[in-house]
Image (cartoon, rainbow, N blue to C red):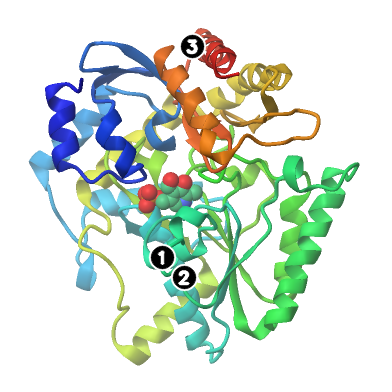
């Protein structure tokens, strides 16, 4: 029997990423409030938010300083835009702060409101850049199977997940996908991580040569794949991939939408994994998820081309109403101030060994094939048979069942593509809360088998 609120939900809301048919029967989990790493449903039941919302609430819930930053900015200048050279101090100050933090050469910061928009902008900029340089054929974009980059037409085209393509008439022509860098599933028996990385890089090179390097503009990658299964790349992966991209002048775009701002114990995920990108997209934890904000870094070579294009075309024809929204910018500034003041990134790094040890111990569980992560993110794969790595019948929805049991135990985690479960708690999680999280997850796995 659904509650009143749940019934109203079912009657009115079209839910993103939800089985719409099943939802009519099960209804929603309606949350009312949050505090620290906990959220509470309308019955007052507490849950550890083991996914930081959607990989974003790094500072947890009910952070009064973030609420006050939003309130103060709303009282002062609730809206301002950056079109036609207009500006305001929160956007300027945030761009300065982010430029300082960027791990790659950066001339400018471009703001938007989501990860999807940031990645869409990356595609448009790669195209615009190559047109400006007189290379109109250099337009193809390579992503990876199971990569996730968002839902707008171009970002969903770069995404490598079936649910984002089937019956959506995507990917668009000119978007290609190479293999998922997942050693557990993709490596040959006995193949080392380094050898597997070299093979993936050779496959990428073959793809570029087959397509013609003069037709390939960019390659996009998350440092750790998120929605595709919380998959950590094999050792040496980015070094090997980058050597190939450099040979053919293919831009590397780092999708730091999940890994940016401390998730791997470094400010950006690429820093933990030897990634040297030409540009990077960010969103989510830049405001700890409290208000929507995304953006990307514009490297010097690209920026020079954009300026030259303005001389030719008169205007840089891209941007949204909310690019650099003052309230979002003010909240991001406060978020980053807290990250620095409270040493949140260093804290994530110091808690990572405990988190990873508890995660790795789950690999001993009878139905867990792989349990691997880095920093404060981890993925585990549920298997029907550990020795052969055989998966459950997809119709059994085993990861979703495990996640439902976890919810019963007072833990929110997320089922992902295939039989994987992701864990990605707020970065402020305390050591005893890490233990509580994994105790609950273990009980959920016990009930799943
Ligand atoms: N890129 C990555 C790596 C993501 O995980 C996501 C969202 O989960 C996106 C892009 C899309 O961001 P948004 O949902 O804000 O559009």
- Assign the C terminus to one quadrant of the image: top right
Q: Residues within 10 Å of mark 1 (few under 14, many from 20)?
A: many
Question: How many badges with numbers are in the image?
Answer: 3
Residue 56 visible here: no
**Percent x, y of residue 283:** 40, 47
Q: Depth check: 252 or 384 in front? A: 384
Q: On the image, which quarter does residue 202 sit in?
A: bottom right
Cα distance, mark 1 to mark 2? 5 Å
**Percent x, y of residue 300:** 52, 69
- Above-or-below relation of 128 to 283: below
Residue 71 visible here: yes
Cα distance, mark 1 to mark 3? 37 Å
Whether the residues at callouts 1 and 3 have beta carbons within 8 Å, the answer is no
User: Is residue 71 shown left or right of residue 292?
Assistant: left
Q: Which residue is mark 2?
A: 123
Q: Depth check: 397 or 199 in front? A: 397
Q: Which residue is mark 3?
A: 433
- Above-or-below relation of 37 to 238: above
Q: On the image, which quarter does residue 1 sit in?
A: top left
Q: Which of disc 3 and disc 1 is earlier in sequence?
A: 1
Q: Secondary structure at mark 1?
A: helix
Q: Residue at x 44, y 29 (%)?
A: 51
User: Is residue 222 shown left or right of residue 169?
Assistant: right
**Percent x, y of residue 10:** 19, 36
Cα distance, mark 2 to mark 3? 40 Å
Q: On the image, which quarter does residue 368 sit in?
A: top right
Whether the residues at callouts 1 and 2 have beta carbons within 8 Å, the answer is yes
Q: Secondary structure at mark 3?
A: helix
Tag of residue 449? none
For this orientation, the residue located farthest to the left is 75
Q: Which residue is mark 1?
A: 120
Q: Residues within 10 Å of mark 3 (few under 14, many from 20)?
A: some
């Amino acid at each position: 029997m659904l509650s009143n609120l749940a019934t109203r939900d079912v009657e009115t809301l079209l839910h993103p990423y939800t089985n719409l048919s099943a939802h009519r029967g099960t209804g929603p989990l309606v949350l009312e409030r949050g505090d620290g790493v906990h959220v509470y449903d309308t019955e007052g039941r507490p849950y550890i938010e083991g996914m930081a919302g959607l990989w974003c609430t790094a500072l947890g819930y009910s952070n009064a300083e973030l609420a006050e930053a939003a309130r103060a900015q709303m009282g002062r200048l609730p809206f301002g835009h950056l079109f036609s050279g207009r500006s305001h101090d929160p956007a300027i100050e945030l761009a300065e702060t982010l430029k300082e933090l960027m791990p790659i050469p950066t001339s400018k910061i471009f703001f938007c409101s989501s990860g999807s928009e940031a990645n869409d902008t990356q595609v448009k900029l790669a195209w615009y850049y190559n047109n400006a340089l007189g290379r109109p054929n250099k337009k193809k974009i390579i992503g990876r199977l199971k990569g996730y980059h968002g839902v707008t037409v171009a970002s969903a085209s770069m995404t490598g997940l079936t649910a984002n393509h089937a019956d959506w008439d995507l990917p668009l022509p000119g978007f290609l996908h190479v293999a998922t860098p997942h050693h557990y599933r993709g490596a040959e028996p006995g193949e080392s991580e380094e050898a597997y990385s070299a093979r993936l890089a050779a496959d990428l090179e073959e793809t570029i040569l087959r397509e013609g390097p003069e037709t390939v503009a960019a390659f996009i990658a998350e440092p750790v794949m998120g929605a595709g299964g919380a998959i950590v790349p094999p050792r040496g992966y980015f070094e090997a991939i980058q050597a190939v991209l450099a040979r053919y002048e293919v831009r590397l775009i780092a999708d730091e939408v999940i890994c940016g701002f401390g998730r791997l114990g470094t400010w950006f995920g690429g820093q933990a994994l030897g990634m040297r990108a030409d540009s990077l997209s960010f969103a989510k934890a830049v405001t700890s998820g409290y208000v929507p904000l995304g953006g990307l870094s514009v490297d010097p070579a690209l920026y020079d081309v954009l300026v030259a294009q303005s001389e030719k075309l008169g205007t840089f024809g891209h941007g949204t109403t909310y690019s650099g929204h003052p309230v979002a910018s003010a909240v991001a500034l406060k978020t980053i101030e807290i990250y620095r003041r409270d040493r949140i990134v260093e804290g994530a790094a110091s808690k990572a060994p405990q988190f990873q040890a508890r995660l790795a111990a789950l690999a001993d569980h009878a139905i867990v094939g792989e349990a691997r992560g880095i920093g404060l993110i981890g993925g585990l794969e549920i298997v029907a048979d550990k020795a052969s790595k055989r998966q459950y019948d997809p119709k059994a929805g085993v990861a979703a069942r495990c996640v439902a049991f976890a919810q019963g135990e007072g833990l929110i985690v997320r089922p992902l593509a295939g039989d994987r479960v992701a864990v990605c708690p707020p970065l402020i999680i305390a050591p005893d809360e890490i233990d509580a999280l994994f105790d609950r997850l273990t009980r959920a796995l016990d009930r799943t088998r």
